[in-house]
């Protein structure tokens, strides 16, 4: 029974078995206490680091404001890319004429593809920008 308890404690504290280990009951009790104290110290350090690295309420608001501003700037940039692609498409040589060569058709296809990709990126960035309107914890607090 004592061997089973020793193996459970050593496994749960993730100390491992190692080359050297206590063989007497007194030594196992001391090792068990040392393992538990070690676990408590490590968990206290993790908790204190987590608490010290969390944003305060004001810092979280500032962070989300900055994220929202950067996201809206990215959306404007993507919208300008869509407009540029549309203008490039209309300026392809021979776009207005009835005669089309294979080169013109290929250029149109390339610009249509680029414009479609730009529109997709714009839509995705717009969704992301709209998600930064309010922090989740603040929305839950208001509910």
Image (tube, rainbow, N blue to C red):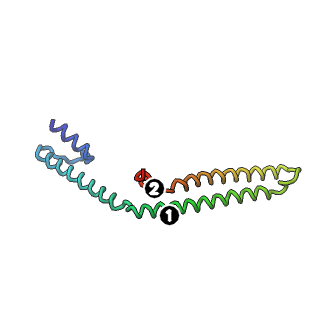
Query: Residue 104 at what x, y percent from top left?
Result: 82, 52
Which numbered circle lies on residue 102? none
Front-most of 20 and 119? 119
Q: Where does the N terminus fall, quadrant-wise?
A: top left
Pointer 2: what residue? 135
Horizontal relation, residue 76 to residue 57: left or right: right
Find numbered disc 1 in the image and state the secondary structure of the residue it sits on. helix
Image position, residue 101 (x, y; %) = 85, 50
Q: How many marks?
A: 2
Residue at image point 17% right, 49% down = 33
Mark 2 Cα-neighbour bin, 10 Å: few <14, some 14–19, many ≥20: some
Task: Name the element at disc 2.
Answer: loop
The residue lying toward the viewer, choosing from 75 and 113, is 75
Q: Looking at the image, tell me whether mark 1 or mark 2 is earlier in sequence order.
A: 1
Quarter location, residue 52: bottom left
| Mark whose residue sits in front, 1 or 2 | 2
34 with respect to 102 (left or right): left
Q: State the residue in front, 96 or 14.
A: 96
Taking the image as shown, residue 18 lies to the left or right of residue 101, namely: left
Distance between the alpha carbons at the discs numbered 1 and 2 = 12 Å
Where residue 118 appears, x then y in whole percent?
66, 54
The answer to whether the residue labelled 1 contacts the one labelled 2, judged by CB atoms less than 8 Å apart, is: no
Is residue 15 left or right of 119 when viewed as pictured? left
Say above or below: 1 vs 50: above
Q: Which residue is mark 1?
A: 66
């Amino acid at each position: 029974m004592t061997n089973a308890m020793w193996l459970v404690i050593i496994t749960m504290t993730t100390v491992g078995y190692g080359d050297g280990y206590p063989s007497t009951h007194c030594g196992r009790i001391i090792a068990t206490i040392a393992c538990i104290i070690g676990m408590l110290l490590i968990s206290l350090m993790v908790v204190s680091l987590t608490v010290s690295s969390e944003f305060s309420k004001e810092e979280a608001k500032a962070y989300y404001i900055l994220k929202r501003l950067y996201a809206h700037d990215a959306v404007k940039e993507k919208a300008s890319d869509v407009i540029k692609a549309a203008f490039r498409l209309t300026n392809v040589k021979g776009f207005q004429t009835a005669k089309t060569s294979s080169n013109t058709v290929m250029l149109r296809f390339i610009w249509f593809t680029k414009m479609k990709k730009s529109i997709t990126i714009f839509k995705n960035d717009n969704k992301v920008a709209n998600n930064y309107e309010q922090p989740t914890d603040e929305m839950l607090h208001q509910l």
